[in-house]
Amino acid sequence: MLVLIGPTAVGKTALSLSIAKTWNAEIISGDSMQVYRTMDIGTAKIIEDERQGVPHHLIDIREPEEAYSAADFQAEAAGAISDIASRGKLPFVVGGTGLYVESLCYNYQFADKGSDDAFRAEMEAYAERQGAEALHRKLAEVDPAAAERLHPNDIRRVIRALEVQHTTGQSFTEQQAGQKKESPYNLILIGLTMDRAELYRRIEHRIDEMLRDGLVEEVERLLARNLPPHAVPMQALGYKELARYLRGECSYEAAVELLKRDTRRFAKRQLSWFRHMGDIHWFDMGENFHNNLRSIHAIIAGKFQDHLEYTSNQSFLDGGNVQ
């Protein structure tokens, strides 16, 4: 299995298509929001016409009203991997949701225990009364590491981390640390990074493009579905900020500035998560794209040298131009 990770706006999509076409791969989205139908612009979802014939999996598989968890992703992605491999193709996971990707790579065990509906409802009510920041402070008291990784507005995951602590007496971070970092896959992890200032510039440019492409109207359509405030889409970047504007809680300019700030912070947290995973080949996307691509191809060839039937375009091995 090949995995490509990195923060939002770093350039995963373009690079993944080049790699997938060379290695006869099929892409599995490792993004927790791209599973939802109708959430296209705000999730930077790759549309059919942009996929260049490369099959993509785990995109548009849920309605916004439906819940979707890391355990759901792990199970469905594992099924997709088996299907792709059975057809002689290379499974290729591309995404930026750290827990999703890590749980798949290392087959984390998700315990059935640790669920308390009454406690969850109590925490949801607390967030409604006191606000997301107050709820987040509760988590920081019992699990500072989890609080560092989770944004205060990610109410669903903050509550889940509190619920684990409440029901098991063990923090979410402690449970994650107890997982065995052994992969069931012959695995390559490729990580993308970039100068922080350039990444932030790209993030702001992407958000401006999303707004021009109709992000406000996309959020309006979601609000028209009368989703509950704690539904996953209402917590997603781009949706929760603009929903505040559409409900008259802040100005358009304030909502956009908040979105840009929150997305910069989100990218920082993504990088923190990935860097603690280890075993990643890192590439700076501010450097020459083709040199990076050639080096990545060499890593794949070295690791999967006994499986070169994957290769659909070997020009990079033969000294030709990178495709």
Image (spheres, rainbow, N blue to C red):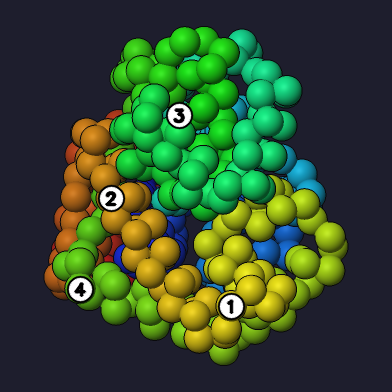
The Cα–Cα distance between marks 4 and 1, rounded to whole angstroms, is: 27 Å
The Cα–Cα distance between marks 4 and 2, rounded to whole angstroms, is: 14 Å
Does residue 293 appear to the left or right of 20 in the view shown?
A: left
Q: Earlier in the sequence, mark 4 or mark 3?
A: 3
The Cα–Cα distance between marks 1 and 2, rounded to whole angstroms, is: 30 Å
The C terminus - image quarter? bottom left
Q: Position of residue 78 (x, y in %)?
A: 56, 29
Q: Amino acid at mark 4?
A: Ala
Q: Position of residue 116 (x, y in %)?
A: 68, 19
Q: Amino acid at mark 3?
A: Ser
Tell me, yes or no, whether the two marked residues, 2 and 3, touch with CB atoms within 8 Å: no
State which mark lies toward you, 4 or 3: 4
Q: Residue at x 49, y 80 (%)?
A: 254
Residue 304, compared with residue 11, is above or below; it is: above
Q: Amino acid at mark 1?
A: Cys
Query: Where does label 1 land, which residue?
Result: 250
Label 3: which secondary element: helix
Q: Residue at x 72, y 23 (%)?
A: 117
Query: Where does label 2 land, which residue?
Result: 271
Query: Where does label 4 land, which residue?
Result: 197
Q: Residue at x 37, y 34 (%)?
A: 140
Query: Where does label 3 land, which residue?
Result: 103
